[in-house]
Amino acid sequence: MESIIVCGGARLTGEVSVSGAKNSALKLMAASLMAPGVSRLRNVPHIADVEVMSQVLQALGAHVSRDGDVLEIDASELTSHEAPYEFVAQMRASTAVLGPLITRLGEAVVAMPGGCNIGSRKIDMHLRGLEALGAEVHFGHGSIDVTVPAEGLSPAQVTLDFPSVGATENLLMASVLVTGETVIENAAREPEIVDLINYLGAMGADIRGGGTSTVTVTGVSELHPADHTVIGDRVEAGTYLVAGAITGGPVTVRGFDPIHLEIVVTKLEAAGSEVEVGDDWVTVRRDGPVRAIDIQTLPYPGFPTDMQAQFMAMLALANGNSIITENVFENRFMFADELMRMGADVRIEGHHALVKGVPSLSGAPVRSTDLRGGAALVLAALAAEGETRVGDIFHIDRGYDRFCDKLAALGADVRRES
Ligand code: EPZ
């Protein structure tokens, strides 16, 4: 098992470029199953989850090849409609093949996504929406079998109880060839949804309202392969911005759309940093103390739940008390116990975390509990006194491309060790 070793105290300075967005790339890969032929995705991050999704696509009969940041997916012939359990158990995002398989093959069998370290991760909204389109859903042996009736799917108006990113994506991909107009109300508005809609449009789909709560899909007769560049990863960008804020900076993060981090930038400024925003870059520096602020995670454009852990690491050093409320996932404070091993003073009350600022954190052996919690522990270690050893970093490798290299290039004393 590998660990990340950090010697804290260095002020990070310089410039870092982010990779393509994990939470878009994985869905674009799944969407490529719907186009017979060779699709090309550019700016694809080098992360473990992309490897797993490549294996899922190949298990379904597609061929995936990679040349640097470019992924070629040949979905001319699909040989299976089953996403194997070992992949879904490993990566919940495998459920994104549900919609594409229903559209391409009229049937999909996907293992029930187990829970994970941040919550139960149900897919009831995905399934209710698919049933509204006329799909038949059966459960058995830990798998979900979704089939299209002989007469095909019918257009529907689906209102989501919650603007679920995954449910919005699966319903979009299940309805692109359904004759008529399907409307998704209370749709998710994340930038990764817009990126998927742009890719589907390039493949020949007719979708309006991307980025708003009401998305309308008008069925077309077929989709064709396309060539698309993945948007920059706003969460990776936010993570390096917090690295700059927690150590002082100035750090410039490049390669993403700053509009996608508008509320994060506002919160960085409220917490005591100076921020400069360019067209595809943001610079952060902090000379004064970290100020205590309150944060509520919400669906986009609210404060992103994927930035909650990183901000808790910074607010652990604030000059007062902060309240962080996690409204999206039911169990996303797991890493706080590890942060407390470094001297943070955090009290969890249900969906609320009361973070009492302390003058300093001390390096300690800790373990990643999940992807963003693991990254947050590294950020805390950058500001902590002494050495921190972060274990179980496979969580971090799922979503961060060359994390240690990029931090070291900013001046951090950080290395991987087996
Ligand atoms: C996506 O997860 C992202 N993952 C998550 O990023 C992100 O935190 C989340 O969206 C919210 O922005 C990928 O894109 C691969 P949801 P997803 O459906 O689609 C509940 C990261 O760190 N829910 O919007 O699973 C669900 O349990 C990851 O990169 C249902 O109850 O998010 C959760 O509590 C973590 N029933 C909430 O809704 C459903 O049918 C939001 O889930 C679907 C969701």
Image: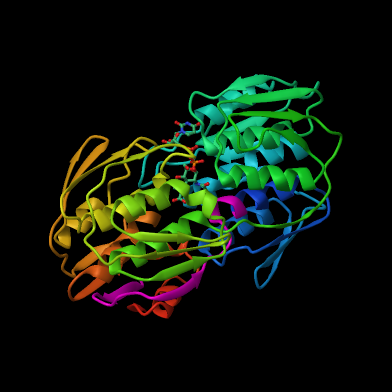
Q: Quadrant of the N terminus?
A: bottom left
From this view, report whether residue 37 is shown above or below residue 18: above
Query: Does residue 105 appear in the picture of this structure?
Result: no
Left-right relation of 102 to 395: right
Is residue 153 located in the magenta-colored stretch of the structure?
no
| Residue 194 x %, y % | 63, 43
**Res 95 quadrant in image:** top right
| Residue 122 x %, y % | 46, 34
Residue closest to the eye, 157 or 383: 383
Q: Quadrant of the C terminus?
A: bottom left
| Residue 261 x %, y % | 48, 51
Is residue 14 located in the magenta-colored stretch of the structure?
yes
From this view, report whether residue 183 is shown above or below residue 346: above
Q: Residue at x 64, y 57 (%)?
A: 230
Q: Residue at x 74, y 21 (%)?
A: 155
| Residue 281 x %, y % | 52, 63
Outermost residue to the right: 221
**Res 136 quadrant in image:** top right
Q: So how many labels did they put on this image? A: 0
Colouring: rainbow
Left-right relation of 301 to 33: left
Magenta highlight range: 1-25
From this view, report whether residue 357 is shown above or below residue 286: above
Left-right relation of 108 to 160: right
Residue closest to the eye, 294 or 141: 294
Query: Does residue 119 appear in the picture of this structure?
Result: yes
**Res 71 quadrant in image:** bottom right
